[in-house]
Amino acid sequence: MPVHIANVRVRPKKAPPTNLCAGQLSAMLGCWAATKDLHNTGTCAQAAQDLFHCMRVTPKTGKVARPSINYHLAKLKKITK
């Protein structure tokens, strides 16, 4: 019994990127908007330190390996012809 595959595509769902330091960033931006302390010398110094610490500690997300299911399905289609 032959297997017929016509233009089969399987794509993973894309998850939106997550920002782990979003709270610290919004705190610093809010401080800047409220006090106009753009050089972080006065009241915004602690918010800036919190953001810098979060950015240092948070692991970097590297490039995620793409699944090769579409490649293998294309090869299977060529083999079954």
Image: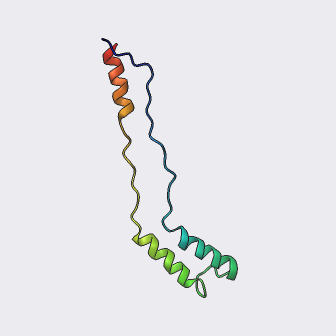
Residue 70, by quadrant, is top left
Residue 67 coordinates in the image, percent (x, y)? 37, 39
Examine the rendered structure and indicate whether residue 15 appears above or below residue 30.
Answer: above
Residue 15 coordinates in the image, percent (x, y)? 49, 49
Examine the rendered structure and indicate whether residue 50 appears above or below residue 66.
Answer: below
Q: Residue pushed farthest bottom?
A: 42
Instruction: Indicate how the structure is coloured in the image.
Output: rainbow
Q: Nearer the viewer, residue 61 or 23?
A: 23
Residue 42 coordinates in the image, percent (x, y)? 60, 88
Q: Is residue 1 left or right of residue 48?
A: left
The residue positioned 40% from the left and 19% from the top of the image is 5
Examine the rendered structure and indicate whether residue 25 appears above or below residue 80.
Answer: below
Q: Quadrant of the N terminus?
A: top left
The residue positioned 56% from the left and 71% from the top of the image is 25
Residue 44, by quadrant, is bottom right
Q: Quadrant of the C terminus?
A: top left
Q: Is residue 16 left or right of residue 36?
A: left
The residue positioned 64% from the left and 75% from the top of the image is 30
Residue 20 coordinates in the image, percent (x, y)? 48, 65
Numbered marks: total: 0
Examine the rendered structure and indicate whether residue 54 appears above or below residue 76.
Answer: below
The residue positioned 63% from the left and 79% from the top of the image is 31
Residue 60, by quadrant, is bottom left
